[in-house]
Image: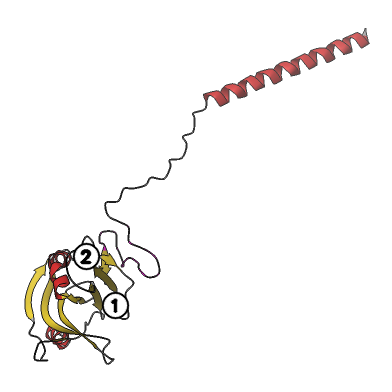
Amino acid sequence: MIAMKTNAHAVLAALAAIAAMTMLAAGCSRSQDDAPEQAAPDAPQTLPRDEPILSRDRAEMPAAASADADVNAASLGFDLPEGWRAVAPGMMRIAELRAPVPEGVDASEAAEIVFFHFGPQGAGSVQDNIARWANLVLDDDDEHADPDIKTHTVGDLRITEVLLMGDYMSGMPGGPQTRKPDFALVGAIIEGGPEGPVYVRMTGPQPVAQSHLDAWNAMIRSVRATR
């Protein structure tokens, strides 16, 4: 009798264990089925671009940019005109652009636009800088060309613009120079920026520079402080 009771108890215990395991498995299954489905991570979005991306190879790279400007020069931002491109700035330049030879214009080279900054103190007075630019352009008598000067404001910024026409003496200061006939030099001295004056200069064959004057004017008038 004792052996039978022992066997019966063992069988009951085994059946109870099986029932408990069955209920636990069912509970786990319901828990998984009732759990909210996790959303798959969103795929990265590709934003449409209205303009071509600037080349980023070693020979060509975008100018310094900020969140709200295409070109940033010493905390002054400018809109980049359509068709112009940024290139790696040369010595002493903080930004540099190229404006292409328009279709139908007979010219051998594009216009070059460069940005300079010499610290909060600038590089002398406005008249000093106009005189330096005039020294780079010669008239038919080998005299310094007479500049056409105008001054205006954009917000709190005072802008002096200069136009010079003649033969452009290209080259580094103190080094050999190349005389380029029938060129134009368009310059802008922008005062009142967060980091001091910024100097912008466009040079190129006269028909090329003249074809880009509207774009130049729009770029200069787009100037704003970026900090």
Report the residue at 88% width, 9% height from top.
Answer: 5
Front residue of 218/13: it is 218
Front residue of 156/21: it is 156
Above or below 25: residue 175: below
User: Is residue 217 at all visible to an observer of this figure?
Assistant: yes
Above or below 86: residue 1: above
Report the residue at 29% width, 77% height from top.
Answer: 93
Quarter of the image with the N terminus is: top right
Disc 1 residue type?
A: Arg
User: Is residue 227 at all visible to an observer of this figure?
Assistant: no
Find residue 47 and report its horizontal and vertical position in percent. Answer: 33, 48
Q: Is residue 70 left or right of residue 45?
A: left
**Cα gap from disc 2 to disc 1, whole angstroms:** 16 Å
Label whose residue precedes the other's in the sequence (2 or 1) = 2
Q: Is residue 128 left or right of residue 89?
A: left
Query: What numbered label is drawn on residue 93?
Result: 1
Q: Quadrant of residue 7?
A: top right
Front residue of 54/12: it is 54
Q: Which residue is mark 2?
A: 78
Find residue 110 and report its horizontal and vertical position in percent. Answer: 23, 71
Q: Secondary structure at mark 2?
A: strand
Query: What numbered label is drawn on residue 59?
Result: none
Count of all numbered marks drawn on residues in the image: 2
Q: Quadrant of residue 6?
A: top right
Region of the chain picked out in magenta, as a range = 53-70
Q: Please tell me whether residue 79 belongs to the stretch shown in magenta.
A: no
